Amino acid sequence: DQQVKQNSPSLSVQEGRISILNCDYTNSMFDYFLWYKKYPAEGPTFLISISSIKDKNEDGRFTVFLNKSAKHLSLHIVPSQPGDSAVYFCAAKEGTYKYIFGTGTRLKVLA
Amino acid sequence: EAGVAQSPRYKIIEKRQSVAFWCNPISGHATLYWYQQILGQGPKLLIQFQNNGVVDDSQLPKDRFSAERLKGVDSTLKIQPAKLEDSAVYLCASSTTGVAGGVQFFGPGTRLTVL
């Protein structure tokens, strides 16, 4: 039973345009969400997070939106750069510092 | 600040053999996690330590997997005996327990291939 889902396994975007990565979840008890970025042969690195009491969090080119009623969050990258090409995982916190990860979306930014 | 260290980076073994992975978390991080990431999937939590105590090992296949965190610092994860389906990347992560919500810092992972 996949509690955190990323339904798009891959996404291609032109450099300079917006990248939108989506994540859906089923457990209404999740209270904190994170996005991680992963390059090949490296561990995931933290990108941005959002608490369930907020609906938006912005950090430079990265913005995460949370729609609690729809149990949906999205990561916007504007403008997209070739260095953003990576696999992006969303993760949701359950209980005390336990995180459940989605399956990832591979983003390719075309120069 | 040094990151999370893991070794080895790669390991190839035959089924029914044993293997061990080592992790050194970021200094001062009380919480340590071991994840299994099978190709095409997201990381799946195997075990979570708070200092040297186990917080969650509900998804650890205890008949073959074991983990310990002696003195609340380094940790080892062992598989004995290995099966073909254990082929995966094993990620170690650590975090503080402060108000940041426990953002996890990951090591580079150990890629295990079981033949």
Image (tube, rainbow, N blue to C red):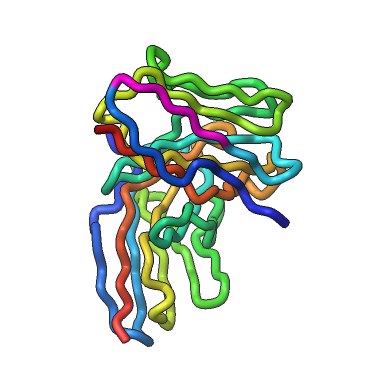
Image position of B73 (left or right of B61): right
Q: Nearer the viewer, residue A41 or A81?
A: A41
Up the image or down, B36 lies above or below A50; here it is above
Image x and y of residue B52, in percent: 68, 24
Residue in view at x 50 percent, y 53 percent: A34
Residue in view at x 43 percent, y 27 percent: B19
Give the residue furthest to the top: B63
Residue in view at x 50 percent, y 60 percent: A55
Instruction: State which quadrant residue B17 falls in.
Output: top left
* Region of the chain picked out in magenta, as a range: B16-22
Up the image or down, B66 lies above or below B5; here it is above
Residue in view at x 29 percent, y 33 percent: B114
Image x and y of residue B85, in percent: 26, 30
Any magenta on residue B20? Answer: yes
Q: Nearer the viewer, residue A34 or A15?
A: A15
Image position of A33 (left or right of A105): right
